[in-house]
Image: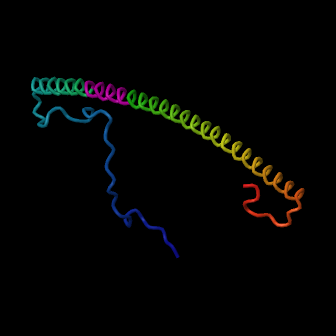
Amino acid sequence: MRTRTSQGDKAPSFARPSRPRDPYANTTLSIHASGNTKVDAWEKAELLKIQKRYEKSNLTILEWENEKKTRAKQRVEEKKKELDQRRSVNWQHYQNKLARIDHVAGGARSRTEKNKRKEEQKIKERAKEMRSLGVSSPKYCFLC
């Protein structure tokens, strides 16, 4: 059977404590609690200067990053448009080739069919002539 464990039986938690959103919110300005207010004020002013300088630097980096990403996206879109146009031109070229092949094949078929009918007509005429002459077995060089 299962029994409930008490709080003392549980393993210790190794989770990190949550950090404050503002890095300067929970820090004490002076390491030594000496009570020197001029030093505290100077330290606070210097920390504020550093914070502003790095915020400005981060803004510059962010602007640069956004500009580069925008340019890269524009280039990708241009390439994509160019590729779509090429694909369209190639598809049209392919369709034209297929139409030409169909046209040539149709002409060849009609010529072949015409030649077939012509040869069949010759054979029918020879057979008719042979029958009229009373030839019982055809020779290969009958009317040569």
Q: Quadrant of residue 54?
A: top left
Magenta residues, start to end: 59-72
Q: Is residue 98 magenta?
A: no
Q: Position of residue 49 (x, y in %)?
A: 17, 23
7, above or below 117, in the image: below
Residue at the image point whose x is 76% and y is 64% from the top: 139
Image quadrant where one finds the C terminus = bottom right
Which of the pair 51/57 is nearer the observer? 57
Q: Is residue 33 above or below residue 42?
A: below
Question: In the image, residue 29 lies at what x, y percent?
Answer: 17, 32
**Residue 86 falls left or right of residue 20:** right
Q: Looking at the picture, tell me which residue is in the foreground, 79 or 103.
A: 103
Drawn side of residue 107 relative to residue 127, left or right:
left
* Label tally: 0
Q: Give percent across and percent down for residue 140.
A: 73, 62
The majority secondary structure of the magenta stretch comes to helix
Seen at 10% across and 23% down, the residue is 38
At a point 83% along the width and 53% down the height, the residue shown is 124
**Camera-side residue of 71 and 2:** 71
The spot of residue 126 in percent (x, y) is 81, 54
Q: Reply above or below: 81 against 139.
A: above
